[in-house]
Amino acid sequence: MHCDAVGKICKSDTTILMVGKHLWRKEKTKVSKLGEVRKSCRASMRNLGNLYFDFKSNMPDSQDSSDMFLRENFKCLSESIINITTKDSDVKYGLKNSLYYLLIRAAHIQEGEALTLRGVGADSKVADMKHFRTILKHHENSLFSDSKYLINQSRQERLRLPARSPDDESLQKLRQYTLKNIETLSSTPVESFGKREYVKLRNLTCSRLTLFNARRGGEPARLKIKDWVERKKWIDGRSIEKLDEKEKAMFDKLEVVFASGKGNHLVSTLVPSDCVAAMAMLSEPSVRQAASVSPSNEFLFPSSNNSGEHCSGWNAINTVLKAANVQCAAKINATNQRGRISTLYAALDINPDDRELFYKHMGHTAKVNCNTYQRPPAMLAVTKVGAHLLDIDNMKTQPEGTAEANSEAKRDEARDEASSIKPQMKLRKRKSQKEYPGISYSSDDSSDEWQLEEETESEEEEEKVQKKSETESEEYEEEEEKVQKKSGRVNWSKEETAMIREKFKKWICLPHPSKILPNKKEVISFMEETELISMYRYEKVRTKIMNEQKTQQLKVVRALNIQ
């Protein structure tokens, strides 16, 4: 703690010390995050100290920060919250939001301690803390709603702006600088590898892994030597032998290391082949000793000067950016890179199972990926949605191209209907001739579709007509069966379903709620190639594709809900 007025309060105030002690004990379970826990605990204590410092200026008679949690002093506490979270009419929304949850947590800690000690006044202390939490939640909207709104606005608007994404040219320059220096330092003899070289290689490798994997800044920095040394235990060699050659080749290009991520989730870190030699150098005991790394430091990217902590991921990236002299370096950080990768990955044609693996690698869900990291599809909104809205605004009942498509569909339906009716009409005619060989028919009478004509005089001619009628009757009966098959419900075979799913997986695997389907020309071309055109109508195949798309999207939605 700093030795200022707030620091002295944090060191002497019994309530703040009790809250800090409890926070440290509870968060101490995050063994790999002790550095972050220490900073978080210190920041929470200092926030309470700042709040009490302002509170005490309004209530000079107060002797302890526990007075802030009395309901009769809530008005004074509210004024202090506004004072320390407002600067020049601007709200420090992050600080204000964190204060709300810190006060709730501090009240819980005091209540728990009072119940545990069971001393004099313990019951009244418990009642006071319950009343305080009720009052704080009651005034949550009036006192903290502006901070919650500003946080959401910042997350949805400022942080997701496409302009915040790093440009490809800067990233390429950074990559070339990083790879060149990693290769140079990795080939340096161990004897001449000192602290300066070690720190530089550490920053380069940590920066490379963070940006390559689109990880949060602190995740690769928390990797331990044990995680790297034991990485092979995650890969089953027998399973690799069953893969095809293309997939086998990936194991020559990448290594995989698993470590804890945000919320103690196990997340993967992929190590490109260009970093393997650097990782081996950073974990070498003699090299670490020469770089003044503590023997008890178990991190793969350690702080030097015999510290027990790991380096800062943000500092590693920032140091490399300055050394590479990259323009617009402020745009290149872990958060912006996660947004960039999430947006680019969402635009790829990938099946849902592979997409789920990507979300697991990123350490979040599809919902978080879409609502937090992805840049909004502004160009699609203008070109697709905007075109339809302009047509509607101009009083066009159908957007451009729709009327033509509808008329074409109607012509197709009329043609199909005519082709299905015509064989049936001929069939009825031929069947009648078969039953009454001496009678022929014409369509002159409008009241009755068919009309008797004169009997065939020649028996020989009559016999020819009869044979011809029987042959044509059989042909038309077969044609009628085909027509009925086309117009009725289709029972698709497994082979037909597999062919359709494979051919049109680009559309079938589109994320919910997309309903985009392939155009008619593409579907008919497929039907001609597979000879489905002789068995089914275009509408039936199109409906099949649409149903497969709905089924696939439903599976993905259900899987996400289960998770």
Image: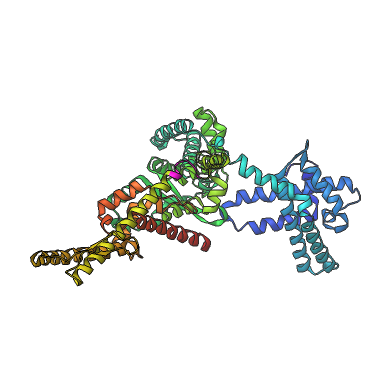
State how the image is colored: rainbow
Task: Verify whether residue 552 appears in magenta.
Answer: no
Q: Main secondary structure of the magenta part?
A: loop
Q: Nearer the viewer, residue 103 or 359?
A: 359
Residue 345: x and y in percent read 45, 45
222 sits to left or right of 156: left
- Which residue lies most toward the right here? 61
Q: Is residue 349 left or right of residue 143?
A: left
Above/below status of 547 relative to 166: below
Nearest the camera: 46 or 415? Answer: 415
* Residue 287 versus residue 326 in the image, above or below: below
Rendered image quadrant of residue 131: bottom right
Decide if residue 493 is in sight here. no
Image quadrant where one finds the N terminus: top right
Q: Nearer the viewer, residue 335 or 519?
A: 519
Q: Is residue 470 visible?
A: yes
Residue 353: horizontal and vertical position, in percent? 42, 56
Q: Residue 431 lies in what quarter of the image?
A: bottom left
| Image coordinates for residue 548, horizontal then vertical, percent | 40, 58
Q: Nearer the viewer, residue 170 or 35?
A: 170
Q: Which residues are magenta?
A: 398-403
Q: Position of residue 165 (x, y in %)?
A: 53, 37
Determine if the magenta segment contains residue 402: yes
Q: Residue at x 38, y 35 (%)?
A: 187
